[in-house]
Image (spheres, rainbow, N blue to C red):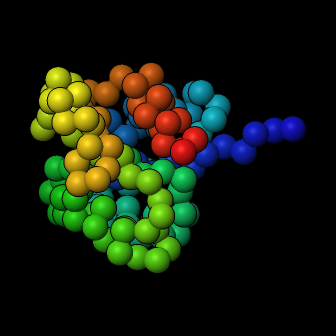
């Protein structure tokens, strides 16, 4: 029996970063990855595709990641989708010191290692 792929959405204004994460996750064969480099489109995309998990950059030009998360959590269609923040603002040491949580959501420091990201995704999706 073929295992159904988990759907991941990346909302991050850095297109190269999105493509790298998408490629690395899809190479595993367990994930189907969508991406949006525009926060507003990302919110709409999340409502359309109902992903299993959303990766959100915190610093973006039009709307910051915390506002994106707020909008997603306040919509009945997306409120139960787990969110992981990705940020270049915190170091790996700081993420460990903070317990890896910002605003109730897990976060990872950029640049993120593929295995670290996959471990985080798996821990959340198994819960």
* Corner quadrant of residue 62: bottom left
Q: Residue at x 19, y 36 (%)?
A: 98
User: Where the C terminus falls, by quadrant?
Assistant: top right
Q: Residue at x 48, y 43 (%)?
A: 124
The x and y percentages for residue 120 are 43, 34
The x and y percentages for residue 114 are 42, 24
Is 87 above or below relative to 51?
above
124 or 30: nearer the viewer: 124
Is 98 above or below relative to 27?
below
Horizontal placement of 60 versus 18: left or right?
left
Q: Residue at x 12, y 38 (%)?
A: 89
122 or 4: nearer the viewer: 122
Horizontal placement of 106 versus 89: left or right?
right
Q: Is residue 71 visible?
A: yes
The x and y percentages for residue 71 are 31, 71
Horizontal placement of 30 versus 3: left or right?
left
The x and y percentages for residue 35 are 43, 50
User: Where the N terminus falls, by quadrant?
Assistant: top right
Is 61 above or below relative to 33?
below
* Corner quadrant of residue 108: top left
Q: Residue at x 44, y 54 (%)?
A: 82
Q: Is residue 33 visible?
A: no
């Amino acid at each position: 029996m073929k295992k159904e792929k988990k759907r991941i959405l990346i909302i991050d204004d850095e297109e190269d970063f999105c493509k790298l994460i998408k490629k690395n996750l899809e190479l595993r064969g367990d994930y189907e990855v969508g991406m949006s480099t525009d926060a507003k489109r990302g919110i709409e995309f999340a409502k359309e595709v109902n992903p299993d998990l959303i990766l959100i950059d915190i610093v973006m030009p039009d709307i910051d990641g915390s506002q994106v998360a707020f909008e997603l959590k306040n919509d009945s269609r997306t409120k139960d989708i787990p969110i992981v923040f990705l940020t270049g603002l915190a170091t790996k040491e700081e993420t460990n010191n903070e317990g890896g949580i910002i605003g109730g959501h897990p976060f990872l420091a950029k640049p993120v290692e593929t295995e670290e990201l996959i471990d985080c995704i798996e821990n959340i999706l198994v819960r």
